[in-house]
Image (cartoon, rainbow, N blue to C red):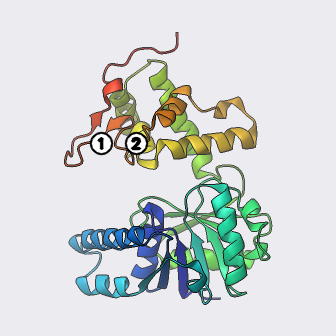
Amino acid sequence: MKIQKVAVIGSGTMGNGIAHVFAQYGYDVHLIDINEQALQKALQTISKNMDRQIAKNILTEQDKQQALNRIKTFTNIDNAVTDRDLIVEAATENPTIKLDIFKKIDALAPEHCILASNTSSISITKIAAVTKRPDKVIGMHFMNPVPMMKLVEIINGFKTSSTTNQVITETAKALQKVPVTVNDFPGFVSNKVLMPLINEAIYTLYEGIAGVEEIDTIMKLGMAHPMGPLQLADFIGLDVCLYIMRVLYEGYGNPKYAPCPLLVKMVDSGNLGVKSGMGFYDYSNKDSKELIVAPQFRKHNPVVV
């Protein structure tokens, strides 16, 4: 089966990025969100990101207009998925919401349609179990920012068929991405490795071993990471980091996955990173291009004796 018609559910950072790349590479895209304002904001974001691609000679103005014309927006899921070949769910990382979405799209989508989730941690097997087509349910985990990042982590659920995997693998390649298939375990590979690294960096700050800038500088310059782990945590969202750490802790039952108390405290306080304007760094001045450490971390002192 060749994918031609795609629906993307959720128009946030990941959803609009996924819609962007599918439209850029010639797919007919339905972008779905219950909030009309969110959809309009998503289209503006896609347009701005395509302007950046034009500036880098990746796209032409004509390419941009053709891609935008391929995207149609919907606030009602019933009207948006009945003729699709592939549906990619990119809603908030909440199991209840995702399971409800998959029950609904399973009932509405044509029999041949593949149902994919962009989840970063929720079991694909669990998602597939609420549908009548578990062989056609798969994880399609794009990385942020979607138009730039090459990896697509493809996750096979317990009943995902080899045919479904092959179709999604070829589709990812058609988007000029690099697909890598993994099995369905908590955190998959990306977050099973990444989140404990971020959590350990937070512990290093919590214990007063080093400050925010020192930790991030060492990882950037010493380990060739493009972004320090604390800045990356802010970029991902500290609430998302905490959620994934709890998924790992519950899934593996290993104390090494216990979330750092400082991470818990920051989420409880509403300091979630870029999205809230404050995390390990201060993002309250949106015009500033300088990375500024959050006030409470400008002098680091040991918290744990």
Q: Mark 1, residues whose alpha carbon is within 10 Å: few (<14), some, or many (≥20)?
A: many
What number of labels is visible?
Answer: 2
Viewer-nearest residue: 163 or 275? 275
Label 1, label 2: how many angstroms apart (C-alpha)? 8 Å
Mark number displayed over residue 283 = 1
For the question of whether residue 200 can be seen, the reply is no
Could one spot residue 63 in this view of the protein?
yes
Q: What element carries label 2?
A: loop
**Which badge, 1 or 2, is on the more N-terminal residue?**
2
Q: Quadrant of the N terminus?
A: bottom right
Q: In which quarter of the image is residue 13?
A: bottom left
The label number, if any, that marks residue 273 in the structure image: 2
Q: Is residue 190 above or below residue 46?
A: above
Place of residue 173 in the rendered image (x, y in percent of width and height, measured from the top left): 52, 75
Does residue 113 appear left or right of residue 260 in this picture? right
Q: Residue at x 30, y 42 (%)?
A: 283
The one of 38 and 223 positioned closer to us in this rendering: 38
Q: Which amino acid does label 1 sit on?
A: Tyr
Where does residue 72 sit, x and y in percent of width and height?
44, 84
Q: Residue at x 64, y 63 (%)?
A: 98
- Report the residue at 71% width, 62% height from top: 124
Badge 1 marks a residue whose secondary structure is loop
Query: CB under 8 Å between callouts 1 and 2?
Result: yes
> Residue 163's quadrant in the figure?
bottom right
Q: In which quarter of the image is residue 105?
A: bottom right
Q: Residue at x 36, y 84 (%)?
A: 67
Residue 275, how many percent across, how many down? Answer: 39, 48
Q: Which residue lies furthest to the top in this view?
A: 305
